[in-house]
Amino acid sequence: MSRSGPHGRETALAEFADLLSRARGGTGGAVEIRGGAGLGKTTLLAAAAELAPDFRVLHVRGAAAEKTLPGAGLHQLATALGTACDVSDTSPEQLFPLYLALTRALAAAARENPVLCCVDDFPLLDSVSRRGITFCARRMADHPVLLLLAGDPAEHGEFPVVPLPPLSGEASRRLLADLVPDGVPRDLADELVALASGNPLALTELAAALTPAQLAGTASAPTALPPESRLRARFRRRYDALSPAARQFVRLVVAGERVDGDTVVRAARETGADLCALDEATASGLVREADDVLEPAGALVRSSLYAELSLADRHATHALLAKVLDDGRHRLPALVQRAAIAPRPDDPLADELDEAAATARKTKDYASSATAYHQAADLTADPHRQALRLLAAARDAWLSGQSRRSRTLLRRVPPLTGDHTVRGLAALLAGEIELRDGTPADGHRSLLEAADELGASDPALAITALMRAAEATCAAGDYAAFFTTAERVRALARPEEPLPRLMSDHFAGLAAALRGRFDEAREPLLRVVTAAEHLAGCAPKVWAVLAALVLGDDERAQRLATQAVSAAADDGVLAPWALEFLAHTALRLDRYAAATRAAVDGLRLAQVRGQHNCAINHLATLALVAALQGDRATAELRLAHAADIAAARGLARPVVLASWALACLDLAEDRAADAVDRLRDVVVGGTDPFVRVLATPQFVEAAVRSGDHTSAAKALEVFESWARSTGGPAHLALSQRCRALLATGEEADERYREALRLHRRADRPFELAKTELFYGERLRRDRKPRDARKYLRGAWQTFQRYEAAYWADRARAELRAAGEAVEHPAPPELDLTPQQAQISKLVAEGATNREIAAQLFLSPRTVEHHLRNIFAKLGIRSRVELTTFFR
């Protein structure tokens, strides 16, 4: 447990804190905590008690041995209350008086201090006690009493539920660091976290069983919970309680991992097993069925039960599956089952697996091809061929979203071969995985190693490795390493080859831009943009997007980003990366709805692909969009998901975007000095030159509003240099607006008017509205309300369209102060925005506000705000009426 409570349970603890606060105010009740075995219900109850030092805490715990003793749980409650309630007679006619007496005792105890009643293992209480405690809970609404009832997810009660899902990977790593203070090698930590599958008890048991050799990295990681594990014993007891036929079905699913219904039926016919026993197997909770496919109830169940099987049972089960799958339609699954029991080595079977894996790869069934290549490698005698097959397995595991498995396979490659190309390809893949789902600084080292290995045999591929290495330096915020990498590219580039030439120009242009020499950067970056139009593939398009953004050609950047996303459709690994740039270009164009769609798509795809660094980048972008619209609740919700992983992995860009987003929120709430403090690290001393330039307008605004004109003017010089080099009206408009903020009198008016002219040329509605607002505010203060109203009205209407509640309210207040009466709801002629339409559709499908918020990465409060606007626009009053619009 961390100082702030159990790792990964911040949401539950925040909810408990709110419930305890309400209980202190006299509003009590009950909440159910639902989670499977080992997920930390007992620990969470203890943490809840720590949040309530001013409460009288009562503890009740169910026990299987007492489940048949009527009133045993009520006896615990009565003892904890110190009441004289007689629980010895639990006959039906005495239950109501008994329950009533305990209810009164709870209420009486709460008159002295608020009461927290923690009931652990609630389903294991006897039925009389369960009914009695729920009877009491129903009557605590007007008393300072909170009951927390901890049970299994299969239980269905009547009170609000706090679910306990498995821990995230990052929360699991933090828990592991607490369990093993001296540290665990990263590779071993990855294996333990994956094996524990988010179960805190499993991770605790695995950590306790680690050997010195495993901690030293000289022994392999465990593949199952230790034999003495309580969780493993729990699974074993469930398995042992089944009938022989049901146990056979469980063995089939555990050995096959995913088995379709037809295979199960044929296996039953082969052995004469009664298919009715399949219901018994699924009812045990050890296997589950969905869409006619049976699979173990989680990786933890699968590894535990497989470890429990005898060698004879394993062999017989794999042999049975191989036999029933050998029908010509399931060649690869049959080979996989044969390989599980084949002697080592078995080159003929390895060759068959290799051929079948290649076929699966052609159909993009990368999970199957990775398994087949892996097994083929294990059956291969020749070390070099084994290395090639492991490399193929690692690549396909990565393509299927299994980054941890890919890393594990890659670690086996270098000791098997001295071939520079194979070793270079392994290092290239390892570096790419670290870049997308690890620590970019580690990825940079692997990618430089790949370039060294590939330099002689494949210079183009070596340059690709260096491009990825440069991307890793930017992700880590190490721009000194970027310049070093750029020099290496120039040494390898061959001018006669289009792609290496593009890469060389890309590095030359970016290096100049990063040093602030924008005029020097222009020509090579223009060549990059032009060349990328004629080159296939996602990566050249993305590199050209970055070049176009530095050149200030935002429209062309978005076209290239769209092409990059389309090109990435054939290589899903690069799609989340391409979507990052599509979201960023939309944001630069003030197309916030489009930026949100791209970032949400990228976030979901990154999560599916196991690319958590890309997911964090998308979350940070989504937070910035919300902050620019003045939506603190949504921005902070998104940043909270990103902060821990970004810090742990040394991801520089999300940290910088977070500071920028929070500064925008500070500005929106008239805390200009706080915004200056946040943006000073980004704009003045920041390591990210691109964000440094783009955040300058907010820094100038904040500095002017806090009276620091000197800092504002100094920061503006760099921005103006870049804006002039681009010649783009959007950036020149921002430059003029910043100058207007610094100016006085007629000069300020001229600057504002020029900024407005340039904004209209650039078609940037949101920034145009902000300039209209700032100018309107200035005119009103200068006692020119008639002139001010024209600008303030346009700003208000634009902010309404963007659903930027803060900015719309600010413009509306200024408009009213200037003498124009305006209604609060959005103008009725405005159509639904894309976000409003998406929310409306989800409402029509029956989603709750909380479910909509989770799906769209919004706060529930923001969803409520959107619904109020939707109702006003459509002239309706209820969700039921809204549903009729989307039938």
Image: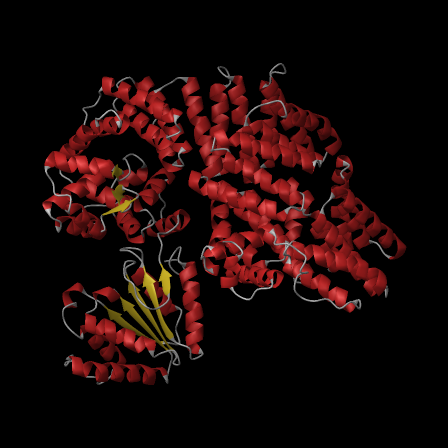
Extreme-right residue of the structure: 746
Q: Picture coordinates of residue 37 (x, y %)?
A: 26, 55
Give residue 153's quadrant in the image: bottom left
Q: Picture coordinates of residue 152 (x, y %)?
A: 28, 59
Compared to residue 712, the image places residue 357 above or below, namely above
701 relative position to 682: left or right: right
Q: Which residue is drawn at 25% across and 84% down?
A: 101
484 relative position to 747: left or right: left
Q: Picture coordinates of residue 682 (x, y %)?
A: 64, 48
Does the rendering let one see residue 352? Answer: yes
Q: Which residue is drawn at 21% across and 68% down?
A: 125
Give residue 819's quadrant in the image: bottom right
Does the rendering let one see residue 515? Answer: no
Q: Picture coordinates of residue 462 (x, y %)?
A: 52, 21
Total numbered circles: 0
Applied colour scheme: secondary structure
- 172, 349: nearer the viewer: 349
- 7, 810: nearer the viewer: 810
43 relative position to 518: left or right: left
Q: Residue at x 39, y 72 (%)?
A: 52
Give residue 675's quadrant in the image: bottom right
Quadrant showing the N terminus = bottom left
